[in-house]
Image: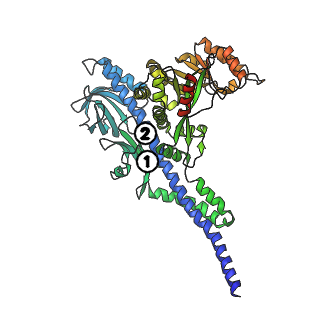
Amino acid sequence: MRRIKTRIAILYGVGLLAVLLPIIAAVLLAEHRSLEQQKDRANRIASEILYRAHRVTDQLAAAVLELNASSGAERCSDANLDLMRKLVVKSNLLIDVGYIDNQEMVCSSFGRHAYRVGLPTYRGGGGYDVRTQVEHPLLPGSRLLISTDHKTGFSALIHEGAVLDVAPADSSRLTYGVFGVRSKTELFHHGAFDPGWLSRIGNAHATTFFDGSRIVAWSRSGRYDFAAYAAIPRSEIDHSWGQAMLVLVPVGIGAGLVLALVVAQLVRLQRTLSTALRDALKNDEFFLAYQPIVDLASGRWVGAEALLRWRNANGVMVSPDVFIPEAERSHLIERVTERVVQLLVQDAAELLRERPDFHIAINLSAQDFSNAALPDRLRGACAQMRVHPRSLHIEATERVFLDVGQTRKTVAALRAQGHVVSIDDFGTGYSSLSYLTEFELDCLKIDKCFVSTIGTQAVTRNVIGHIIEMAKSLQLRMIAEGVETQEQATYLREHGVEFAQGWLYAKAMDIRQLVQKLDTAKS
């Protein structure tokens, strides 16, 4: 009888656990999910604000630079007033451009008038005086930022909304803005920045943490002396948690038989892809593999394409087709590109110095080409490696060429300092002949989807011939990707394609293997 009672008690206990464990798991899952959602939300807001802050700062600097270059002795001359108006009209972010003297805006794109702007809040890098929270007389209650060249007095004005309006409409309880790192000054803000956060941030360029009452995301610029931040209060986390509870707890009550699925869901939701990308950048999970580029006439290896690879903390390889689009969506692509350049400097400096006739190509995104500082960054990398810029080739996908204005300037600047610029994957996306005629390029890469049709009956088998003839007419060198058979290599060589890469010659390899194979071929 005692054994029977014991068995019944055990069965009751198991039954109770079967009910309670899914409920407990649902509660924990709801809490974890709400925290991760709010972390991602904070990171997205900070990334968007930093992206807008970069665009605003670029336009501020460009406007003042153009005024400095064009002005004469008379700051408020008719010619300067006309130029100020043109700068405002062609900018999509500046609200005014003018000249400040003795704490007064003497003239601007609105004409010759004077209103007081007060003392600078602080002096930033590059000799610019910065005034924050300035009210324009034509816009009562406005909160403007003015950047002034302290030598010439020329200034550019923006409204804080140009940076902060990217925040969501339901963000009244959130704190976010742009923070001057050296000056420890709020440039733009919605809600007050907590100085206590600085001890948690330290020297980090990007971090997310919980300060006991708020989730805080911090994203520092790699180009300017400021960072974007966003903080989400506990009330938002609890609200999100409550909403998740309403869904998950009822499910947990009847989920005794699917406990394993709940656990699997908890693991699956442990990290989102954007969070994992930030962790990967922080934990050095990226590395480069190099696929040789071959001279079809001689068979000599003349270069290599650097391919970014990601092996996560669990040892799983994540495809570039997955993480590159996510990096672009979450505005992490510039940091990813910085990591590519850092890895290239570490890997290939010695190789490129010893073999000045060898080159390595890297792929850049549309956001990279929109960055006016890109040529300077690559010039610095070449100087650090002590190699000529011709040793570093640049490959751009067709989507880069949608932003015609900035891309044309960037391409011209890269070619002027000695880089070879190629259009990658031509014919697979957005391209048309106009891109090849409007931009001065050096090389066209033929995508493997066209190379694979050589010798087949595919309906697109004739396209590659048209691409080759078009490249010849534009005097562009050609590299064929994805060459896997000798028949393909023969066809390409006979039709005037100079270079190729693909498994017929070698798969992508690490830098050590590349150097060994080059040394073997040399000896």
- Residue 144 shown left or right of residue 472 in the figure: left
* Residue 207, numbered label: 1
The spot of residue 214 in percent (x, y) is: 42, 55
Circle 1 packing at 10 Å, graded few (<14), some (14-19), many (20+), is some
User: Which residue is at the front of the view, 231 or 383?
Assistant: 383
User: Is residue 192 visible from the viewing direction of this image?
Assistant: no
What amino acid type should be assigned to the residue bearing mark 1?
Answer: Thr
User: Which residue is at the front of the view, 400 or 486?
Assistant: 486
Name the image colouring.
rainbow
Q: Quadrant of the N terminus?
A: bottom right
Q: Quadrant of residue 92?
A: top left
- Residue 278 shown left or right of residue 199 in the figure: right
Going 64% across and 76% down the picture, which residue do you hit?
Answer: 13
What amino acid type should be assigned to the residue bearing mark 2?
Answer: Leu
Going 48% across and 25% down the picture, which residue do you hit?
Answer: 352
Report which residue position mark 2 lands on. Answer: 50
User: Which residue is at the front of the view, 130 or 106?
Assistant: 130
- Residue 324 shown left or right of residue 106 in the figure: right
